[in-house]
């Protein structure tokens, strides 16, 4: 479904008096969901406004389905391209159904009557964004999230080839955000619709989009598969993160603590410790952890949080007596920490570290939920940490 060129641009410059983005060369096939990403003020809205002919290009050309954007009549353009910009319109005295029906006018003409078929499309479009219940209400009386769905329904009713959406989920709660993204994605798959949507939620963009278009510093920074373009470094540079990391394996942002509140060793493994890591990191603790197998979910989360991780390779079977060299390193790190959290994983490495923890004389907290029975809740862990004497404990001993 991606052979046909839906949108093509060459040497495009967009902006106002001065260019905001230069040399924008795009070529989008049909049936793709493309996320437009970039920091505030990078030019996402300006690009969408230019591609939808709300703004004249400063240079270059744009083609929609092989036709020069400038030569399309307003009606032809509306049949091909639907646009939802952020200026959240509140048309006075229009009902939801009348508003969504406006999307049919490119097909019926301004004076055209809605056929039964058109009325069905209006109904289907409202249902697609789970807004059938809003039928009969006045648009001006809707909440921001409800109005956003209705604006999307109008765009769907237009049955376009290309949808240009500026922050289409900004006002939606998590459930509706996921729903709307799912609907747009399935329209791309089933109807060959192409969507270019500016998104601020990079976690969502990484998971729903077929391609990502990154804009920054006056131009296109990158374009391609989210799986290859969205690396931790690229995302950090794009948004200027200092204290967070985008983890490409998890497709999510992790926030690092400043690590100034003390040092904790977490006996982790098999993904059990991910919530423990986040909790300790928010508490401002520097984290060390082991002994993880390569590819363990815990290793990804720990790395994203800036933890020092002791990993053994999949092939590197721990000797029965637990005397592997990486185990020894992990054990030494453990005894140099202020306290220990045991996530209750049951394997030879964890067992060996547990014995070293018990012998270290350091406080050890076992959290519930692992393979081992017993343990405290995460709230109890926080309270227990608060009761510890000030760190660094070992310096004062
Ligand atoms: N009407 C205008 N006249 C002049 N400059 C404008 C106008 N609208 C926006 N700009 C400027 O153009 C630049 C790009 O703005 P734009 O709204 O396209 O960014 P954006 O990437 O959509 O940002 P955000 O994520 O904050 O919505 C900004 O520096 C902005 O101040």
Image (tube, rainbow, N blue to C red):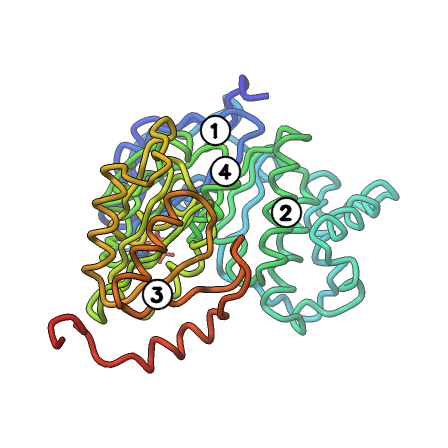
Q: Is residue 26 above or below residue 351?
A: above
Disc number placed over residue 7 in the picture, else none: 1
User: How far apart are labels 2 and 1 at the CA level?
Assistant: 18 Å
User: How far apart are labels 3 and 2 at the CA level?
Assistant: 45 Å
Q: Are marks 2 and 4 in contact (CB under 8 Å)?
A: no
Horizontal and vertical percent position of residue 24: 32, 33
Horizontal and vertical percent position of residue 332: 20, 52
**Sequence-earlier tag: 2 or 4:** 2
Residue drawn at the location 47% of the way across and 27% of the way down: 28
Q: Which residue is mark 3?
A: 280
Residue drawn at the location 59% of the way across and 34% of the way down: 80
Is label 1 or label 4 in front? 4
Is label 3 or label 2 in front? 3
Is label 4 or label 3 in front? 3
Disc number placed over residue 228 in the picture, else none: none
**Sequence-earlier tag: 2 or 1:** 1
User: How far apart are labels 1 and 4 at the CA level?
Assistant: 17 Å
Residue 343 seen from this side: yes
User: How far apart are labels 3 and 1 at the CA level?
Assistant: 47 Å
Disc number placed over residue 155 in the picture, else none: 2
Residue drawn at the location 39% of the way across and 67% of the way down: 365
Horizontal and vertical percent position of residue 313: 33, 31
**Sequence-earlier tag: 3 or 1:** 1
Looking at the rendered structure, the secondary structure element under dot 4 is loop
Disc 3 beta carbon < 8 A from ligand 1?
no
Residue 43 seen from this side: no
**Sequence-earlier tag: 4 or 3:** 4
């Amino acid at each position: 479904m991606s052979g046909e060129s839906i949108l093509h641009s060459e040497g495009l410059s967009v902006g106002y008096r001065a260019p905001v983005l230069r040399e924008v060369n795009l070529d989008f096939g049909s049936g793709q969901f493309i996320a437009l990403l970039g920091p505030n003020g990078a030019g996402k809205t300006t690009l969408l406004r230019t591609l939808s002919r709300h703004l004249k290009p400063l240079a270059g050309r744009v083609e929609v389905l092989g036709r020069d954007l400038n030569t399309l009549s307003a009606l032809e353009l509306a049949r091909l391209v639907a646009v939802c910009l952020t200026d959240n319109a509140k048309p006075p005295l229009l009902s939801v159904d009348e508003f969504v029906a406006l999307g049919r006018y490119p097909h019926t003409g301004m004076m055209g009557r809605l056929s039964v078929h058109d009325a069905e499309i209006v109904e289907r479009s409202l249902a697609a964004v789970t807004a059938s219940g809003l039928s009969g209400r006045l648009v001006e009386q809707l909440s921001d999230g409800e109005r956003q769905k209705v604006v999307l329904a109008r765009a769907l009713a237009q049955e376009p080839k290309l949808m240009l959406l500026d922050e289409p989920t900004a006002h939606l709660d998590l459930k509706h955000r996921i729903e709307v993204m799912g609907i747009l994605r399935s329209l791309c798959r089933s109807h060959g619709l192409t969507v270019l949507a500016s998104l601020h939620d990079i976690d969502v963009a990484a998971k729903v989009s077929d391609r990502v278009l990154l804009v920054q510093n006056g131009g296109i920074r990158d374009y391609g598969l989210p799986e290859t373009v969205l690396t931790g470094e690229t995302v950090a540079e794009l948004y200027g993160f200092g204290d967070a990391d985008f983890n490409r394996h998890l497709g999510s942002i992790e926030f690092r603590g400043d690590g100034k509140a003390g040092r904790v060793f977490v006996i982790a493994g098999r993904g059990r410790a991910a919530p423990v890591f986040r909790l300790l990191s928010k508490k401002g603790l520097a984290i060390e952890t082991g002994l993880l197998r390569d590819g363990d979910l815990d290793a990804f989360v720990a790395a994203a949080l800036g933890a020092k991780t002791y990993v053994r390779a999949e092939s590197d079977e721990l000797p029965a007596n637990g005397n592997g060299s990486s185990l020894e390193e992990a054990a030494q790190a453990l005894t140099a920490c202020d306290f220990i959290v045991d996530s209750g994983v049951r394997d030879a490495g964890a067992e060996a570290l547990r014995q070293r923890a018990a012998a270290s004389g350091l406080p050890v907290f076992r959290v519930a939920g692992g393979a081992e029975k017993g343990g405290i809740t995460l709230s109890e862990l926080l309270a227990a940490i608060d009761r510890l004497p000030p760190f660094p404990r070992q310096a004062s001993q």
